Image (cartoon, rainbow, N blue to C red):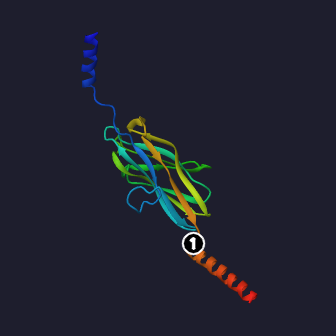
Amino acid sequence: MQRCALAFLAVSLTLPSIAAALPIVSVDADPNLPGVQTTRSVELGDSFDVAISVEAVDAAHPLHAFELVLAHGDVLGGASVALGDFLGADAFLIPGAPSPIGVEIAAARLGPEGSAGAGVLAIVHFAALALGTSPLDPLDVLLAEPFGVPLATDAIHGATIEVVPEAATGALLFAALAALAGARRARRI
């Protein structure tokens, strides 16, 4: 019995640790600000970008390709996608089929090597079509190492966009309400 325990200990000490950090995929609601922003307010009619970013990609398990659906609500539309810089200059965007729930995004590298570290996978350009709140949720996220080996994720984080009235529209509405109140007051006198 002692020999089995010693043999197990010897083998376990010689095996490499398989507990590596797993990638984290996040939606950055405002890529112009430092860090990953989980919320953002935009005005009705605005066009804006969000970023799909990745971090903690281990060099022993580099990222070679990814696929996901970025689900969004009815208040956003006109989505177009551009490839981020994380996968490198030899990466290409794979056109996605129309999706009723969001934007399909997929990309892969041409070469056999992958990328490690942190960076932007894709930039999605939206237009704010209506007032309200829209969650941006990455669904069906698939990451792959070179040669199609699946790569697990540690976490997947979405974001929220709030579409608010234009500042000028709000000021005009306030002015109109004030004028209406003044007219009512003048009639009472």
Residue drawn at point x = 66 percent, y = 80 percent: 176
Q: Which residue is mark 1?
A: 166
Residue 140 is left or right of residue 58, and the answer is: right
Residue 123, placed above or below residue 69? below
Q: Quadrant of residue 184?
A: bottom right
Image location of residue 146, percent across then percent down: 38, 38
Mark 1 crowdedness (10 Å alpha carbons): few <14, some 14-19, many ≥20: some
Residue drawn at point x = 57 percent, y = 63 percent: 163
Image location of residue 114, percent across then percent down: 35, 43
Residue 104, placed above or below residue 185? above
Residue 59, placed above or below residue 160? above
Image quarter where the N terminus lies is: top left
Image location of residue 96, percent across then percent down: 54, 48
Q: Amino acid at mark 1?
A: Glu
Q: Residue furthest front?
A: 189
Image quarter where the C terminus lies is: bottom right
Residue 83 is left or right of residue 76, and the answer is: left
Q: Quadrant of residue 57?
A: top left
Image location of residue 125, percent across then percent down: 51, 60
